Image (cartoon, rainbow, N blue to C red):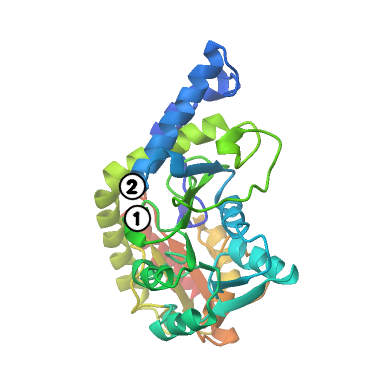
């Protein structure tokens, strides 16, 4: 199989697997236990917390481990307890959009932040947001479908000057571009392990100093009393190791992915009636979202699958229906063209040969 869907999930790095294996079998103690076996496991969690913290430039105490990015996003929005104003961008991941709508049903006011035709939040939208004066704003750092990178640091600085709390979902950006919490000027940030060659089932919420978190899970003192339940030790250890590797290899990975993306775009743009969405916007080095006029994206994904090529028609967490991408609709793309969308998201193990093979198959199927 030629795997080209790394924004959905990445394969587990062999070095990460090696680090986590002992905690699946040998070191099975409960990290809350006081005896030696428990203390050893607790130490492994502490090390992983330091590794994740180092990747995003914070202290370990600011890292709250969760079951993944979805839980971390929900935890961030749960900081709102009393009815208040909330704003999220129209292109957020479903794990932000859906809890935001739930909060609206619970009596909170909700505003959607519009984007332009390139999927970018504009300064005008931020100006309107400041006038709206929400208590909390959530804007993703990089979009999972288009790969578009938002100028979060610039906008967050303006919002925080008005005492507005800012959260960013940095799940797709982590490990692909520098993601430094303080430099982004945000108060809360979501991370996930399985997007950076770590294990599934582990994420984190980075919490700024002075921010109050309201636990969603109660019944234990884990994670500073903010996330009850015995820790997923092996997955946490894997996240730590993946973070350590991402920090060391960030520049090398980014350069390699950009070379492959450039090759992919050069070849795909020779296919008639093909459009790369958000082509002119700053994007992640691994992501290309395109459509071929008259070709249904989901049908094309299934045809490519039969040839052993794994791509997607959008967010893996929002797929399964025959509805156009709400991200593309928010960008002003008409529904007919939005339904042509196919996402290729590259990984560090992909090769130039795989890119050429993929485009040749695409060329054969992409006949209107």
Circles 2, 1 touching at the beta carbon (< 8 Å): yes
The spot of residue 48 in percent (x, y) is: 43, 33
Dot 1 crowding, Cα within 10 Å, few <14, some 14–19, many 20+ = few
Left or right: where 96 falls relative to 267: right
Which numbered disc, 2 or 1, marks the residue that appears first in the sequence? 2
Whether 60 is drawn above or below 102: the answer is: above
Residue furthest top as drawn = 36
How many numbered discs, if any?
A: 2
Whether 217 is drawn above or below 294: the answer is: above
Dot 2 crowding, Cα within 10 Å, few <14, some 14–19, many 20+ = some
Secondary structure beneath disc 2?
loop
Residue 52 visible in the current orientation: yes
Whether 247 is drawn above or below 319: the answer is: above
Residue at image position (27%, 42%) is 248
Instruction: Work out how far the residue at label 2 is from the one at label 1, CA to CA, in angstroms.
Output: 7 Å
The image quarter in which residue 161 lies: bottom left
**Which of the two residues, 227 or 211, is positioned nearer the viewer here?**
211
Q: Which residue is mark 2?
A: 57
Residue at image position (37%, 54%) is 181
Left or right: where 58 falls relative to 25: left
Residue 182 numbered mark, or none? 1
**Which of the two residues, 257 or 295, is positioned nearer the viewer here?**
257
Residue at image position (33%, 72%) is 282
The spot of residue 74 in percent (x, y) is: 62, 56
The spot of residue 357 in percent (x, y) is: 39, 60
Left or right: where 294 falls relative to 345: right
Secondary structure beneath disc 1?
helix
The image quarter in which residue 228 lies: top right
**Which of the two residues, 240 or 197, is positioned nearer the viewer here?**
240
Residue 292 visible in the current orientation: no
Residue 34 numbered mark, or none? none
The spot of residue 281 in percent (x, y) is: 35, 76
């Amino acid at each position: 199989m030629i795997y080209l869907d790394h924004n959905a999930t990445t394969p587990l790095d062999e070095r990460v697997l090696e680090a986590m294996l002992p905690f699946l079998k040998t070191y099975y103690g409960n990290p809350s236990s006081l005896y030696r076996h428990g203390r050893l496991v607790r130490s492994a969690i502490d090390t992983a917390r330091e590794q994740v913290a180092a990747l995003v430039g914070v202290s370990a105490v600011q890292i709250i481990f969760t079951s993944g990015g979805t839980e971390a996003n929900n935890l961030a929005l749960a900081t709102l307890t009393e009815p208040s104003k909330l704003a999220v961008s129209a292109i957020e991941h479903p794990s932000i959009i859906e809890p935001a709508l739930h909060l609206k049903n619970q009596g909170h006011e909700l505003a959607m932040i519009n984007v332009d035709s390139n999927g970018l939040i504009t300064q005008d939208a931020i100006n309107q947001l400041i006038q709206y004066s929400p208590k909390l704003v959530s804007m993703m750092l990089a979009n999972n479908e288009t790969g578009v990178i938002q100028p979060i640091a610039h906008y967050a600085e303006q919002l925080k000057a008005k005492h507005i709390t800012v959260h960013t979902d940095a799940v797709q950006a982590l490990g692909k571009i520098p993601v430094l919490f303080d430099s982004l000027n945000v108060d809360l940030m979501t991370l996930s392990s399985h997007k950076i060659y770590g294990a599934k089932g582990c994420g984190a919420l980075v919490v700024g100093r002075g921010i109050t978190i309201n636990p969603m899970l109660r019944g234990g003192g884990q994670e500073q009393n903010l996330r009850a339940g015995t820790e997923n030790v092996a997955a946490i250890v894997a996240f730590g190791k993946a973070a350590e590797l991402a920090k060391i290899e960030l520049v090398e990975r980014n350069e390699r992915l950009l070379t492959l993306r450039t090759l992919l775009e050069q070849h795909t743009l020779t296919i008639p009636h093909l459009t790369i969405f958000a082509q002119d916007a700053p994007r992640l080095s691994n992501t290309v979202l395109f459509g071929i006029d008259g070709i249904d994206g989901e049908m094309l994904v299934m045809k490519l699958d039969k040839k052993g090529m794994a791509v997607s028609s959008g967010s893996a967490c929002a797929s399964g229906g025959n509805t156009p991408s709400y991200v593309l609709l928010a960008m002003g793309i008409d529904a007919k063209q939005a339904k042509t969308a196919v996402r290729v998201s590259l990984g560090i193990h992909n090769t130039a040969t795989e890119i050429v093979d993929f485009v040749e198959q695409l060329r054969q199927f992409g006949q209107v």
